[in-house]
Amino acid sequence: MTTLTKESQQPEHPELLELDRVTIRFAGDSGDGMQLAGTQFTKTSAVVGNDISTFPDIPAEIRAPQGSLPGVSGFQVSFASTEIYTPGDAPDVLVAMNPAALKTNLADLPRGGILVVNEDEFSETNLRKAAYASNPLEDGSLRAYRTFRVPISTLNSRALKDSGLTAVQIDRCKNMFALGLMFWLYSRPLDTTTRWIDEKFGKNPAVADANKTALKAGYAFGETTEMFATHYHVPKAPQQPGLYRNITGNEATALGFVTASKLAGRQLFYGTYPITPASDVLHELARLKRFGVKTFQAEDEIAAVGAAIGASFGGSLGLTGTSGPGLALKSEAIGLAVMVELPLVIIDVQRAGPSTGMPTKTEQGDLLQAMFGRNGESPVAVVAPATASDCFTMAIEAWRLAIKYRTPVVFLSDAYLGMGSEPWLVPDFESLPRIPVEFASDPATFKPYARDPETLARPWAIPGTPDLEHRIGGLEKSDITGNVSYDPANHDKMVHLRAAKIQRIAQDIPELEVEGDERGGLLVLGWGSTYGVITTAVQRARAEGKKVSMAHLRYLNPFPRNLGDVLRRYDRVLIPEINLGQLRLLIRGTFLVDAVGFNKVAGRPFTIRDIEARIAELA
Amino acid sequence: MVTASRDSKDGIEALSRKDFVSDQEVRWCPGCGDYSILAQTQKLMPDLGIPREDIVFISGIGCSSRLPYYMNTYGFHSIHGRAPAIASGLKASRPELSVWVVTGDGDALSIGGNHLLHVLRRNVDLQIILHNNQIYGLTKGQYSPTSELGKRTKSSPAGTIDAPLHPLTVALGAEATFVARTIDADPHHMVAVLGRAYEHRGAAFCEVYQNCNIFNDGAFAAFTAKEVRADRMLYLEQGKPMIFGKERNKGIRLNGLRPEVVEVGVDGITEADLLVHDETREDPTIAFMLSRMSYPEFPVPVGVLRAVQRPTYDALMTAQIERAVEAEGPGDVRDLFVEGDTWTVE
């Protein structure tokens, strides 16, 4: 246990140590401003040139009782002088603003880790709310950690006693004090955050000043107190030159879809119903009215997808977004879009299921629902972004495929991708390929269900086009004419045509690339948001001399055309998934490859260590 | 009555009813009331004065929902209950189109009840034609949400135990700006009401009493049969007292909060004592009262119960976009790319 008195024996000037990578978790009551402290730390770390990766841990309760265990909110940020792919398995530093935050997060802090606690909050009442029988600061239970007891509340109020603010307002600034302390500990400048404070509270100078004062007081406390024997420096990471910004997966998703609409020159129509963790996409798109984006907050998930289909029928980019339970409700309408062969993109920001499950927690449990969750033979294309920034790329790609093949495309993101952030190399808009859109216009040749010989897509004939009046619907269509048909041979033909159309996409997407050895040994095959942990785990295993390679699927239906060949070149195939083996089922069924799985469904991303351990068993 | 004023485009060729007949064979049971609704709809279309390609019929599932196949316009026969949602998406994204929803009592009030409520309260500029036959026809004779209590059907051999909905009451409760009723057996009235629905800006809800001669034959005959119609139905006319009867001597008077049938010329009652129909009343109380009047206690009101003005959803959506563009200029995604803090790596 480190206390102020004990630490005074430390050297007068703290030592500056260089580190490659640090992971900090800010944890406190949901009213303590931990998300804000975390995002500000992230921004500054990005600006000083570290590679960064973040993951917020937000309670499902909007306002759980103050100081209670369900009310704890956390934000983890990892920053490094090398390229990183994950927000870190475990924090190196835990900032716990109250006993509940300590209780819910301590298990993740490795022994020997730095623990900064706001000792002012360890009152009897708060300890009771956190179900502590005795005070962990006093009972020796924190001996295994490098614990720093800082009276953050007291120091913060003292710094702000002349601010003219109320006690409540002053107390709200304590996150800035904690942030200032972390800025000192990791040698970060304050100016990015002070600029942000000025912008945010520009209209209220007293509040702006108080926040800046608290931030500086925290920094000064680190500098002048003798509590910390060491502080740290994490040098810049080598990054591809260019302009960067920090972006979450949901932001990148929204941005990607707006960009797609510009690249296609068509209006974006987003029909949706609020659902965690997909609502941020709606919030992003709803403010983009000047881009001509229309957002429709429907009465339910079914109406949301229905409206999107209606918009697509009219020639717009009909987009709908949801999370797992909502995808279940949309099933019938997606089947309709399969039958009427109109473009439609469905965002599924997956969360832990089944049923309502754990709405703020991540999972990859919807792959088979996306693939098969409809009646009849009802194939759709499925894509899955691998990282937060990849959400931008794959959103555009989803629209390219939906338009070209006149098909629903499911975009499988998840809570981890959606809420996590990383630096994004801002693309050059001019260099992005345009998405061609062709509407039928010639009455002499128009047949509603005639097909493009290359893509097998039917014509997109939108209302308002003279002499192309035609009727579509969910009843089976006759080939070419689109008339209602119960003819057995026609149905068989149409079922095969719809399947073949989706398979044609395989010729239009990149081949799967392998990182590592061209053949032999273990191949780790992943999909979606596990890219970061798998990459890091495989890199580490290879550094240890293990014969292990990796490949990552961003196209789940159809698969890249070389996938079968790739799989057969390796002795063993490991498929880690945050589900009970959904991709594995598809791979085994499609390619007769005896793939094994790593399946942990805890509502959390995998840790690098998880994957490393499984690799060690197999390679 | 129908005018060619709304959205009419100059220089379009005059169309006739035949231009709106598709090449598909009509497959309703012979004698079905849907034939009449189809015929009046086709008859109305040329009078609208808009190009055929700008007209879209969207339906759900059920006998009524086959109608789009028979209209030579754009059409979408969708899934059960969801036509209002699909139509909302189309109209919101393409406000210049004339979008018609065709639905039935099961489609609109059972499986699609939620969508009906919301399309009405949003006031999306659509015409919604509900064919009410008080039975499930396509699934061959189960009771519907408008079937009368106690009705014996294949699925209710001992009689239904669930109270029916009154479609017009539901529409008024959902803040509908236009609420009307007509019957399949009165083509002139129907075409007039459908025309009024078209002229209305906003969600125009029309219930059509439609006979299913196979599973619920004669459901409305007690008041729609030609020989009794005058005495048992109340044809609402804007600004006119509510008079009915072969002799035009019966009327509706308000007694406190309740309507009552009175005879003009008896007990000193004159026309001046009768309720005067005003479809433009903002207060929906009288319209609600009319929506509850049923035979035999009352004559069954038909015509436009309510027609009030409220901005449409699609117009408001367009206006928000126009305002945003005016205030901030048209969006450039390159500005979005660099929102928030950016930094340059050399």
Image (cartoon, rainbow, N blue to C red):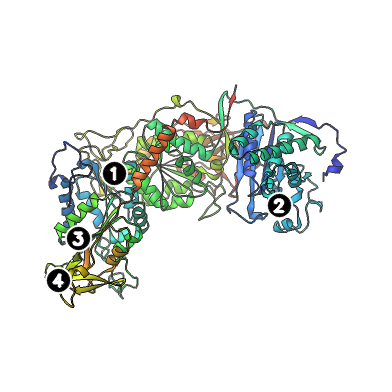
Q: Residues within 10 Å of mark 2 (few under 14, many from 20)?
A: some
For residue B237, the mark is 3
Kind of residue sitting beneath label 3? Glu
Kind of residue sitting beneath label 4? Asn
Say whether residue B152 is left or right of residue A119.
left
Answer whether labels 1 and 3 touch (C-beta < 8 Å).
Answer: no
Residue identified by numbered label 4: B249
Q: Is residue B182 above or below residue B255?
A: above
Q: Chain of mark 1?
A: A
**Callouts 1 and 4 on one subunit:** no
The residue furthest bottom is B267
Residue identified by numbered label 2: A103
Using the image as rendered, state which of residue A28 and residue A542 is in the foreground.
Answer: A28
Residue identified by numbered label 1: A493
Say whether residue A350 is left or right of residue B179.
right
Answer whether labels 1 and 4 touch (C-beta < 8 Å).
Answer: no
Q: Element under label 3?
A: loop
**Callouts 4 and 2 on one subunit:** no
Distance between mark 1 and mark 3 Cα atoms = 55 Å
Answer whether labels 2 and 1 touch (C-beta < 8 Å).
Answer: no
For residue A333, the mark is none
Q: Is residue B154 above or below residue B183?
A: below
Q: Residue at x 21, y 54 (%)?
A: B194
